[in-house]
Image (cartoon, helix red, strand yellow):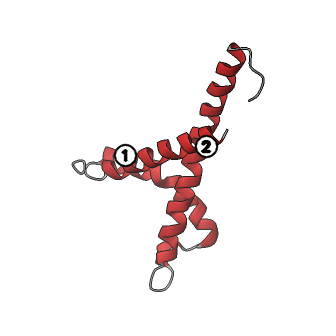
Amino acid sequence: MIRDAVFSLVLTLMTLFAIAGVDHLPCSLARNAISDTLAWPGGLIAGFFYPQGVHTGRGSVGWAYVALAGNVAFYTLLWFFPIRMVTAVRQAGQGRSDA
């Protein structure tokens, strides 16, 4: 289970680097839509802590940190559950019950 969590965290970091790489593509409406959609979970989570987002007063550096942490948490869980299911199916196929 710890191995699955570490693997999902590695895949999360790769996913976040890929999302950041999208911003280096030529500017277009499609690129902006893809970037915004993939970064949306972190922004949604940060919205609970900073309801006005980066537009509060002079802005908030904390919003960006919370959004990044939210994306890490979201994508880690998004990767963890399928990895965990594949591991369970593999172990069941081998006749092992110590998941």
Identified at 46% across, 76% down, the residue is 61
> Which is more N-terminal, label 1 or label 2?
2
Which is more toward the observer, 22 or 33? 22
Q: Which mark is residue 54?
A: none
* Image coordinates for residue 4, horizontal then vertical, percent: 61, 38
* Image coordinates for residue 75, horizontal then vertical, percent: 54, 47
Number of callouts: 2
Element on which disc 1 rests: helix
Q: In this view, does 16 lie above or below 95?
A: below
Q: Is residue 96 above or below residue 42?
A: above
Q: Where is mark 1, residue-wise? A: 18
- Residue type at numbered disc 2: Ala
- Residue type at numbered disc 1: Ala
Q: Where is mark 2, residue-wise? A: 5
Element on which disc 2 rests: helix
Which is more toward the observer, 40 or 90? 90
